[in-house]
Amino acid sequence: MPDEVKELLGRAAERSGQSMQNYLLLVLEREAKFARNAEIAEMEPVGGGPLSMDEIVDAVRTARGAAPG
């Protein structure tokens, strides 16, 4: 790791009150979540496409045990 990068990360860890190891673990976890979200965003929708607002409301009501409107 270049010294400049190490110093910048060390200062960031210090500002957040964490060890360098814990700070880097949190950074890597956050990046992994972003990567997972990007993969999900690229997935093809399942079913017949976008739902209408009425379909969404009916699905929520059904899930809650109420009769669809």
Image (tube, rainbow, N blue to C red):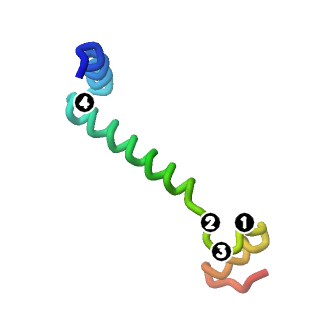
Cα distance between the residues tagged 2 and 1 = 8 Å
Question: What residue lies at 63% left-to-right and 84% top-to-bottom?
Answer: 65
Q: What residue sits right under mark 2 in the picture?
A: 45
Nearer-N-terminus badge (2/1): 2
The x, y position of residue 32, in whole percent, is: 38, 46
Q: Are marks 2 and 3 in contact (CB under 8 Å)?
A: yes
Q: Neighbour class for label 2 at 10 Å: few (<14), some, many (≥20)?
A: few
Q: In the picture provided, is 54 more to the left or to the right than 33? A: right
Give the label, 1 or 4, closer to the camera.
Answer: 1
Q: What residue sits right under mark 3 in the picture?
A: 47
Q: Is residue 67 above or below residue 29?
A: below
The x, y position of residue 7, in whole percent, is: 26, 15
Disc 1 on helix, strand or loop?
A: loop
Question: What residue lies at 61% left-to-right and 79% top-to-bottom?
Answer: 64
Q: What residue sits right under mark 1 in the picture?
A: 50
Nearer-N-terminus badge (4/3): 4
Query: What is the quadrant of the C terminus in the image?
Result: bottom right
Disc 4 on helix, strand or loop?
A: loop
